[in-house]
Amino acid sequence: MLQMTRAMPPIDAAPRHAARTALLAPLLAGLLAALPPAALGAPPAGPEVTTPAASAAPPAGEPPAAESSPDTRGLDQEIQGLKKDVVDLNKDLFILEEELLFPANTQVAVFLSVDVGQFFALDSVQLKLDRKEVINYLYTPRELDALLKGGVQRLYLGNLKVGAHELVAFFSGKGPNERAYKRGASLRFEKGVGAKYLELKIDDRQRKLQPEFEIKDWE
């Protein structure tokens, strides 16, 4: 499933980042405190020992002793393990954040899939939910390539109360003969107690020699 973060609904990011930072800060502080000073680029603590200049040079006729380098493989593995723990925690926090912001009883998600290439090249999609614009998404060539290879994008995620609603989608791009092409599709649906999933589908219709746009309700 293709996940594109720009498709997220317009939510104030400041409280979300502040909450995540507050959760991560104690963990990072503990991880840094557990690391030895050498891992942080600081010299080990302890009294400074001065060596006489005479003892610094090896006796005449003897080769200089090779400097011994400490084995840091164990330390590197420990650091990599700590980094993985931080990444895993960040994923868990992201999932928890979505569950808190979009509980299952009010959640509505809109996905987009594309099966075109001959009659339509997608540029942007605009969504209106109950006559209110919720997202206007402009695609990059890389994102379009991923969709054409079978990817499915979560275009919108939001909250809706139980009852009747209407979703309207406008598709803009290039149609046959490279001409500007804009079409729309709409769907009236009923939001129940559980999460609601809708899919925007763009298909080539060989018989009509034009693209077809529809909205599917995943009941």
Image (spheres, grey):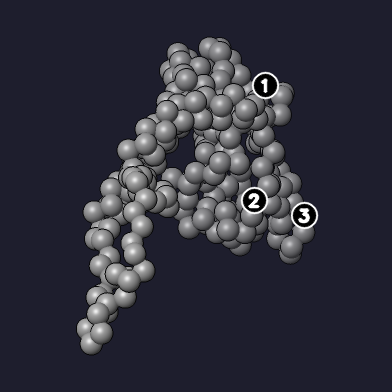
Q: Describe residue 56's horizontal placement relative to residue 12 as left or right.
A: left
Q: Looking at the rendered structure, which numbered label has been put on residue 180?
A: 3
Q: Looking at the rendered structure, which numbered label has been put on residue 141?
A: none
Badge 2 element: loop
Residue 102 location, x and y as percent?
50, 22
Mark 2 or 3: in front is 2
Q: Amino acid at mark 3?
A: Ala
Q: Marks 1 and 2, how far apart in space?
A: 24 Å
* Residue at numbered disc 1: 130
Mark 1 or 2: in front is 2
Q: Marks 1 and 3, how far apart in space?
A: 27 Å
Question: Which residue reaches farthest right?
Answer: 180
Q: Amino acid at mark 2?
A: Tyr
Q: Amino acid at mark 1?
A: Asp
- Determine crowd level at label 3: few under 14, some 14-19, many 20+ residues with C-alpha closer than 10 A: few
Q: Is residue 125 above or below residue 166?
A: below
* Residue at numbered disc 2: 139
Badge 3 element: strand
